[in-house]
Image (cartoon, rainbow, N blue to C red):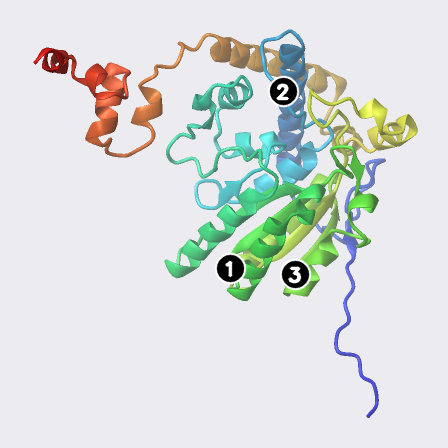
Amino acid sequence: MPMRTVYEAKIENLQILDEDGNFDTKLAPAGAPGVLTDEQAVFLLDQMIQCRRLDEIAFTLQRSGRMYTYPQNKGQEAAALGSGFAMRKGTDWLVPCYRENAALFLHGMPMHLIFLHWMGDERGNAIPKGVNITPIAIPIGTQMLHATGMAWAFKQRKEDKVAITYFGDGATSEGDFHEAMNFATAFNLPIIFFCQNNQWAISVPREQQMNSETVAQKGLAYGATCVHVDGNDIFAVYKATHDARERARNGGGVTLIEAETYRLGDHTTADDARRYRDEEEVESWKRKDPMIRLRKYLTGKGLWTDAKQQAAEDAAKILVADVVKLSEGMEKPSTDDMFNYLYEAIPEDLRRQRDTLRTHSLGQDPSQVGLQRR
């Protein structure tokens, strides 16, 4: 019998705005669905400036002993902002990892909660009601399973909602990624898997932790729509996510987006990337900085000036200073919190523990002491 091809595929890279600020109008004609307007692009640059400032101050807080380990978002703002901006605030759900601050703020996460989280205060995970964000996930990959379960619920309930879950390239080497992808595609769920491929899984480069040429192609085995984008190009990220969201809403199922980007800082403040990264590599990626790229584009269109840049930076300094003041000025949490926030209706035995700060019977009911004398 003759041989026949049973499967073929290709994955193309989407880039609309290059590192020099050149814009491809053929890929993104003005007014087309999934294309950012000039007004939106100006707004997003301002958001980038705020998030970069917050990152810088978080770093200094950690170094001065006022915050615990912190993972910088520097260099990955376009991936988070572009994707977050494409999701519908108050309708869709964001299921983050720990490098998506810019997207979280867009969807209503109070900035001081991010600081509280990294200061070791559990109240940083108390997401306000009405803010469709799950708490930051530190274990690698576990949040993808949560997002898949949420998307399954959306489908079962026939709700017009889409979940987007974020993770790094290293997480795609975890079993959680494959289990979540398999379940999500098998049930055709309304979910977007968004990989921020920043080239390094702590100190392990992408090419050493996987043999596939891209992360995006991993989704092909599961039947997902697979997209590769320039993660430092906010126009490409927005369009890819917008299209994936609409596809999910219309029954098109799962999309895996690989946003190729780079973390310009260390993995966290507990890391020293100089020990394993080449300085020339870092410098080459600095020239692709998403914030600089967007500023070049807007400046070229007469939409951004040095005066606007200075005003945005000054406003960001004031904003973040207020966030620091609020975070450090919070009253200390009560021990009651560990009981009150565990159950909707606290069981009686835990109520006694909370009120007496004792777990043994004598401590909870001192009147029993007299029984020992009989």
Amino acid type, label 2: Thr
Crowdedness near tag 1: few (<14), some (14–19) or many (≥20) residues, C-alpha within 10 Å: many
Q: Could you say which disc has been placed on residue 49 in the image?
A: none
Q: Could you say which disc has been placed on residue 69 in the image?
A: 2
The CA span between labels 2 and 3 is: 36 Å
Asked if 350 appears above or below 83 in the picture, the reply is above
Q: What's the residue at 48%, 37% (across, down)?
A: 133
Query: Image quadrant of residue 208?
Result: top right
Q: Nearer the viewer, mark 2 or mark 1?
A: 2
Q: Secondary structure at mark 3?
A: strand
- Along the polypeptide, which appears first: circle 3 or circle 1? 1
Q: Could one spot residue 30 in this view of the protein?
A: no
**Residue at label 1?**
189
The CA span between labels 2 and 1 is: 35 Å
Crowdedness near tag 3: few (<14), some (14–19) or many (≥20) residues, C-alpha within 10 Å: many
Amino acid type, label 3: Thr
Q: Position of residue 6 (x, y in %)?
A: 75, 78
Q: Position of residue 260 (x, y in %)?
A: 76, 43
Query: Image quadrant of residue 69?
Result: top right
Q: Is residue 242 left or right of residue 282?
A: left
**Residue at label 3?**
225
- Along the polypeptide, which appears first: circle 2 or circle 1? 2
